[in-house]
Amino acid sequence: MTEGNIGATTLREMLERGERVTVVDVRKGEDRAEWAIPGSVHYDAYDALSAGDERAMEGLDLPEGAPVVTVCGRGRSSAAAAEQLRRRGYEALSLEGGMKAWSLAWNTADVPLTGARAEVVQLRRTGKG
């Protein structure tokens, strides 16, 4: 994890543990409609962030006292969004690598086989594809 960023695996683990975190998806609506991080909030600020609008995140109302993770396609727009939210006093991080990185955040589940001498581990991908 680099300064101001959070890795996809770390975010996935936080969500799996039920930690209090607000995930804000700043992509365009059509991109979010294809797939999104479960439980995330959509705030379409992509065009404003891409244009360098320093007020792109001003209309977003967030709960106090919980970290915020901003998400976009590859991590650039969400980094700008997180920076704007930090200036407003939020503990904000950007998902490093964006949804591209999220698509690679594999997790596993043991599949019980009663009476078998084999072990089955199911790999689950958290994104589309």
Image (tube, rainbow, N blue to C red):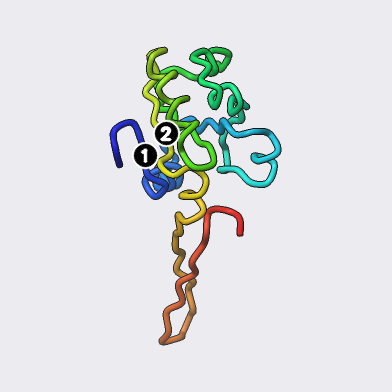
- The local crowd at label 1, few if under 14, some if 14 to 19, many if 20 or more residues have their Cα within 10 Å, is some
Residue 128: give x, y in percent of width and height: 60, 55
Name the image quarter holding residue 29.
top right
Total labels drawn: 2
Q: Quadrant of the C terminus?
A: bottom right
Q: Which mark is residue 6?
A: 1
Do residues under tags 2 and 1 come within 8 Å of each other at their CB atoms?
yes
Q: Is residue 20 above or below residue 56?
A: below
* Three-letter code for the amino acid on which mark 2 is drawn: Ser
> Which one is nearer the viewer's eye here, 126 or 63?
126
Residue 55: give x, y in percent of width and height: 52, 13
Task: Give me the C-alpha separation between circle 2 and circle 1.
Answer: 6 Å
Q: Earlier in the sequence, mark 2 or mark 1?
A: 1
> Which one is nearer the viewer's eye here, 106 or 5?
5
Q: Is residue 9 above or below residue 24?
A: below
* Label 2: element kind: strand
Residue furthest out toward the bottom: 117
- Which residue corresponds to the image point at 46% horizontal and 76% vertical from the top-left? 120
Going by the image, does 108 lie left or right of 50?
left
> Which one is nearer the viewer's eye here, 80 or 63?
80
- The local crowd at label 2, few if under 14, some if 14 to 19, many if 20 or more residues have their Cα within 10 Å, is many
Residue 11: give x, y in percent of width and height: 41, 43
- Which residue corresponds to the image point at 39% horizontal and 31% vertical from the top-left? 93
Residue 125: give x, y in percent of width and height: 52, 59
Q: Quadrant of the N terminus?
A: top left
* Three-letter code for the amino acid on which mark 1 is drawn: Ile
Q: Which residue is mark 2?
A: 94
- Which residue corresponds to the image point at 40% horizontal and 47% vertical from the top-left? 13
- Which residue corresponds to the image point at 49% horizontal and 71% vertical from the top-left? 111
> Which one is nearer the viewer's eye here, 19 or 38?
38
